[in-house]
Amino acid sequence: MTKEIDADMIKCEDFFKILKDNNLTFFTGIPDSTFKEWMKFIIEKDPELLRNIVACNECEAIAIATGYHLATKKFGIVYLQNSGLGKTVNPLTSLCDREVYSIPILMMIGWRGEPGTKDAPQHKKMGKITLSLLDTLQIPYKILEPDIKLIQTHVSEAISYLKEKKGPFALIIKPNLFQKYSDSEIAENSYEINREDAITFLMENLTSEGIIISSTGHLSRELYEYREEREKDHYKSFYNIGSMGCASSIGLGIALQKPNKRIVVFDGDGAAIMQFGTFSTVGKYNPMNFVQIIFNNNTHESTGGQPTNSDSVDFCQVALASNYKFAYLVNTLTELGEVIPEVKTGDGPILIVINIRRGTKVELKRPNRNPEEYKEDFIKYLAESKEE
Ligand SMILES: Cc1ncc(C[n+]2csc(CCOP(=O)(O)OP(=O)(O)O)c2C)c(N)n1
């Protein structure tokens, strides 16, 4: 999404200066590729020049910024992709709203799916309703154009509103607002397996009937590409292209209805953390046919490689403590091979965590048909495929 240096873009340093001059140095949220370069900046400058708290979801980020305000009287910035705006509706209306506690927060919202622009189907509806949703929430906003003087004026207006009206205010960020900040990737890691190898290995070793629910972002796109380059058997997958964090819940819903079919969820670490509570639901309802595989690269790679909090999470312990039957962490393809029999026939719920190296092909395909067509094919396959 990011263009090279361009006069029509602003420098991260210039934007930060405006914020800093207004005493805005506290950030929390979930990243978006719309402001990938800005994320590089705040991650690099944390904690010397500013504070950046990596949240698990956008709802939590609003609450963290609320706590920051209660403790300091200052204003926190919550950054998010507009797909996460829905998650903020609850705390915005029942915590921060001017009819409740009146909490001033500055939101930076990445605008995917802006009407008239080309974007993936999962962004269309939210792209269309982002501004009207803010209107409904009575949250004033400014759309930032690449004009630093104008941005300065908008931030001043926002600050006046935060001070006087004491409610949330939003800055809308379109793709390519920020100039390239640096060439460096945000979070390197040295794991042995990359995502593509892990997918290939799993696909070659799981039963050909296997039903796979895959998570948002590169994971679904790489699985799509795997199938597209071979059998084109997309009907065996449900690509959860939007609703980040919901893949394992979709898998649970299917597994409970189809107890004789093996349901395998390909999950991301950021996605699993976003809906952490799902571990408890899976554990409680305990489907024997449910397998969750977390591709753990410790990052939100799909939005530019910003760190998740998974480096301080032991997913296996969480799963076991939530009543999963087995949980394994694998670091090599050999270790992955050793757990394949369990994945294929062991009693679930099972969790496999694969530590994977960062990195994705430059040109990843996306599912290119109407999502509803994939859904119909998947429903048909689910109904007709043989029981295991
Ligand atoms: C509610 C919501 N917030 C943010 C996003 C933007 N987004 C899409 S993919 C992604 C990163 C997913 O991270 P992870 O699950 O770790 O998978 P990876 O990208 O590393 O494969 C994010 C933040 C989104 N789609 N939905």
Image (tube, rainbow, N blue to C red):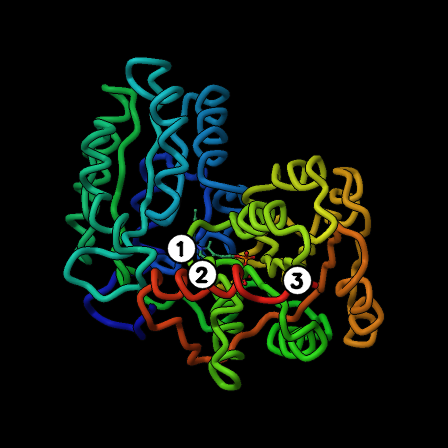
Would residue 340 be found to the left or right of residue 196 on screen? right
Q: Does the residue labelled 1 lie within 8 Å of ligand 1?
A: yes
Q: Position of residue 384 (x, y in %)?
A: 53, 64
Q: What element carries label 3?
A: loop
Q: Which amino acid does label 3 sit on?
A: Glu
Q: Where is residue 48 in the image (x, y as percent from the top left)?
A: 54, 47
Q: Which residue is pictured at 56% across the width and 74% down the height? A: 359
Q: Does the residue labelled 2 lie within 8 Å of ligand 1?
A: yes
- Separation of disc 2 and disc 3 at Cα? 38 Å
Q: Position of residue 89 (x, y in %)?
A: 36, 31
Q: Where is residue 28 in the image (x, y as percent from the top left)?
A: 47, 41
Disc on the earlier residue, 2 or 3: 2
Q: Which residue is pictured at 69% across the width and 56% down the height? A: 291
Q: Which mark is residue 178?
A: none
Q: What residue type is labelled 1?
A: Asp
User: Would you say the residues marked 1 and 2 are in contact, meaning their CB atoms lie under 8 Å apart?
Assistant: yes
Disc on the earlier residue, 1 or 2: 1
Q: What residue type is labelled 2?
A: Thr
Q: What element carries label 2?
A: helix
- Separation of disc 3 and disc 1 at Cα? 40 Å
Residue situated in front as seen by the camera: 62 or 284: 284
Q: In this view, does 120 lie above or below 139?
A: below
Residue situated in front as seen by the camera: 123 or 311: 123
Q: Name the residue under label 1.
A: 32
Q: Name the residue under label 3.
A: 387
Q: In which image quadrant can residue 23 be found?
A: top left
Residue 160 visible in the displayed image: no
Would residue 241 be found to the left or right of residue 145 on screen? right
Q: Which residue is pictured at 72% across the width and 76% down the height? A: 205
- Separation of disc 1 and disc 2 at Cα? 5 Å
